[in-house]
Image (cartoon, rainbow, N blue to C red):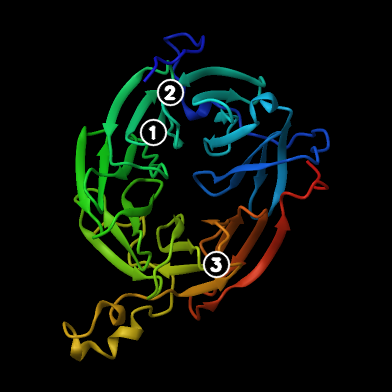
Amino acid sequence: MASPTSHSQPESESMNLSSYPVIHPTRNPTPSTATTFHHLCINQDHTCFAVGLSTGFRIFLTNPYKPIMHRENLETSSGGIRFVAMLFRHNIMCLINGATNCVRIWDDVSSRYLGEIPCRAEVKNVKLGLDRIVVVLTQRITVYGFKDLRVLHEIDTVVNPNGLCDVSYNPGGMMLVCPGLLKGQVRVQNFEFSRTEFIMAHDSNIACLALTLDGRFLATASCKGTLIRVFNTSDGSLLQEVRRGADRAEIYSLAFSKTAQWLAVSSDKGTVHVFGLKIHSDTSLTQTTTTVPQLDVSSNASSLSFFKGVLPKYFSSVRSVAQVRLKEGVKYLVGFGKNDFTVVIVGIDGSYYTYEFDPVEGGEMSRLEYYNFMKNEETF
């Protein structure tokens, strides 16, 4: 990997979240009609989503939906912005243009690049921690310091064409998860304690993974897409298993609610499922009760408990509490809104939805909002 070019920030100054101004709505020229869609992402706490375009990038608030930023004519000579990585709702983000494998740190307050990280191979993903930048290549993950772009860690991983990686934001130090070197294995790297945990999560290759913001819990799905498993990252123990369905599916997105009481899952079947979890992040890891009444998600299996050990797993796995069916084949990313019972869904076809579910009755979710965020008449 080539050495990064550092920005001019003094060595003594520590870059932390409090030093980054919050993005506020700005007025921009009317977007160009000749726009190609490149990339879509939801930020860490699901309060914003960003779109990389041939003309620049756009940022939108979620729940309620509101366009807040459109940067026009940015890197258009190089194909526009093919990748955007956000740091919560702050002005610092990482951008990759369409013609290079260079990760560039953009400061939207000053409208300039602060530094860049040139890479010898195609960049598959970028994740921002509070004081680190994680760059994912096909077979290597490199962690850089935010302050001086110095290489802090290098991790070899399996061939990772989708750039699978996630990071947590524990105030004590960042945690990283990625596929391990074996099929179905997940690597959990705790930088605070310099500890590595390997979890054999599935029998087949990992297709999707997600951490809670505090890094305590990990959700994984394999390329089969039938079972989603939730693990304790401190010891690798399996806490819960939920079932999306019986047929194979490609899992596009996993997201924990803020309390880790709910897990949202999207797939190529056009469905978004919400599962009730027996854990949540404001209790000890040994507690399994929840503070909000919810549907007895295990009731489908409880009446068959006499046959435990005889029936296949399909009959004993926890099923979803709530669900909604959208357009099949569209890649949807999911998150949670202002409360744990509101689900944010963003599609690469330009669709934005918020849905609400009943935590007691469950069933089909109710739509609250719909917008097409790629329409040129949107006002920024």
Say which element carries label 3: loop
Q: Is residue 67 left or right of residue 281?
A: right
- Which amino acid type is marked by label 3? Gly
**Pointers 1 and 2 in contact (C-beta within 8 Å):** yes
Q: Residue at x 41, y 23 (%)?
A: 120
Residue named by callout 3: 270
Out of 275 and 294, give the one closest to the viewer.
275
Label whose residue precedes the other's in the sequence (3 or 2): 2
Label whose residue precedes the other's in the sequence (1 or 2): 2
**Label 3 vs label 1: CA separation?**
29 Å
Q: Residue at x 28, y 41 (%)?
A: 158
In the picture, the disc for residue 226 is: none
Q: Which quarter of the rendered picture does the C terminus lie within? A: top right
Residue named by callout 2: 119
Q: Residue at x 42, y 69 (%)?
A: 275
x and y, in percent, of residue 36 in the image? 69, 41
x and y, in percent, of residue 228 in the image? 34, 64
